[in-house]
Amino acid sequence: MSEKDFIKDGLQNEEIVNIIKQIRPEIEKDASDDNIEKLRKKFNFFADRYPVLFDLSTRKDHFSWENLNYFLNMRTKIIEDNLTTDKASVIVGQDMYNKYVNITEPPSKFERKQKKSKT
């Protein structure tokens, strides 16, 4: 099995974006579990083949077109043999760490509260 076998039975990036463009307005109107299940049935192949993308696209909050485009651009680099999946994984992990976790300034000094003395 090749590291690019995920493409053979999958969708092109443009198809992924088009599906998400159909899902997002529905979620903006109604992010209930019932509506998500309706969308899961409507976009069954997408939901089964790309469960993480389906989950991300059906979240009311924390959806980012910027992050989606970033991931799809990495996918394109893999498809075009500009990156291996291993290298792309390392780059994505580091970029996401830098974006969401890395602390550029150390936290201020921790100070304990002084106990109130009984007088």
Image (cartoon, rainbow, N blue to C red):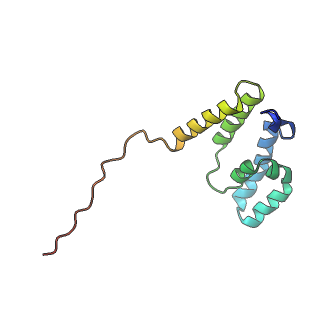
Instruction: Residue 64: name its quadrant.
Output: top right
Is residue 86 shown left or right of residue 9?
Answer: left
Q: Quadrant of residue 117?
A: bottom left
State whether residue 22 is above or below residue 31.
above
Please provide percent x and percent y for residue 90: 61, 34
Q: Is residue 119 left or right of residue 40?
A: left
Residue 15, how many percent across, how many down? 82, 40
Q: Position of residue 118 (x, y in %)?
A: 16, 74
Q: Name the residue at 38% across, 40% down.
A: 105
How many numbered marks have been drawn onto this rendered protein structure?
0
Q: Residue at x 71, y 55 (%)?
A: 58
Q: Nearer the viewer, residue 5 or 21?
A: 5
Q: Is 87 drawn above or below residue 50 in the view shown?
A: above
Question: In front: 29, or 39?
Answer: 39
User: What residue occupies the far front of the structure in this picture?
Assistant: 1
Q: Which quarter shows the C terminus?
A: bottom left
Q: Is residue 24 above or below residue 67?
A: below
Position of the N terminus, as image quadrant, is: top right
The furthest residue to the left: 119
Which sits in the foreground, 10 or 85? 85
For image coordinates 75% across by 57% down, the residue present is 26
Residue at image coords 86%, 36%: 8
Taking the image as shown, residue 6 lies to the left or right of residue 101, namely right
Q: Position of residue 106 (x, y in %)?
A: 37, 42
Q: Residue furthest bottom?
A: 119
